Amino acid sequence: MKILVCISHVPDTTSRISFTDNNTKFDTSGVQFIIGPYDDYALARAIELKETQGAAVTVINVGLADTEPTIRKALAIGADDAIRVNAEPVDSFFVASQIAEHAKGYDLILMGRESIDFNGGVVHAMVGEMLGIPSLSPVMKLDIEGTVVKMAQEIEGGK
């Protein structure tokens, strides 16, 4: 099984942030960047599937060279390979189209429910639509038995 995990490069929530240019530009000096927490959950589940089912895990990030440390961290955690789409992630549609372009040939695509920098939560649905495959978010549990995938989603009043 080939798994693609989408990771975002976001400021650590404990970092002190500031703005420059009349409060119009995010000042990245002194800011620690991390894998988005929701994406981290997806990566952890992919690595569990790697360990239990022999899956191959590739991470993908849409970003410029400054995202390399985040990608290296994903590899250190246990991803087998990485793809960095060398482009500024200008909006959700652009990010989704870049991911969809590289996602062909994977059996499973995992991503966090949203990135904590823009909180859009729409990339997964766009990627699914672009590839013509089902998309479900947020998934609270994912089990794979042979060719059967079982997912649990939290809804109002239960799962």
Image: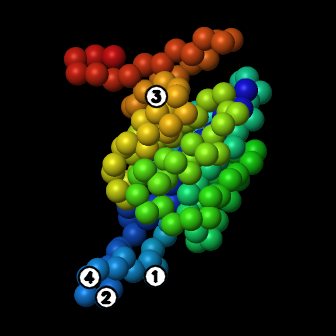
Numbered label attached to residue 29: 1
| Type of amino acid under label 4 | Asn
Tell me the residue that label 2 is attached to.
Answer: 21
From the viewer's perspective, tell me whether residue 122 is left or right of residue 147. Answer: left
Give the mark toward the camera: 2 or 1.
2
Percent x, y of residue 147? 66, 12
Please say whether residue 134 is visible from this viewpoint. Answer: yes
- Could you tell whether 44 is left or right of 93 in the image? right
Front position among marks 4 and 3: 3
Let me know if residue 49 appears in the view. Answer: no
On screen, residue 73 above or below 1: below
Q: In the image, is residue 70 above or below residue 6?
A: below
Q: How far apart are the alpha carbons under marks 4 and 3?
A: 37 Å
Label whose residue precedes the other's in the sequence (4 or 1)? 4
Estimate the spatial distance between the alpha carbons at disc 2 and disc 3, rounded to whole Å. 40 Å
Q: Quadrant of residue 152?
A: top left
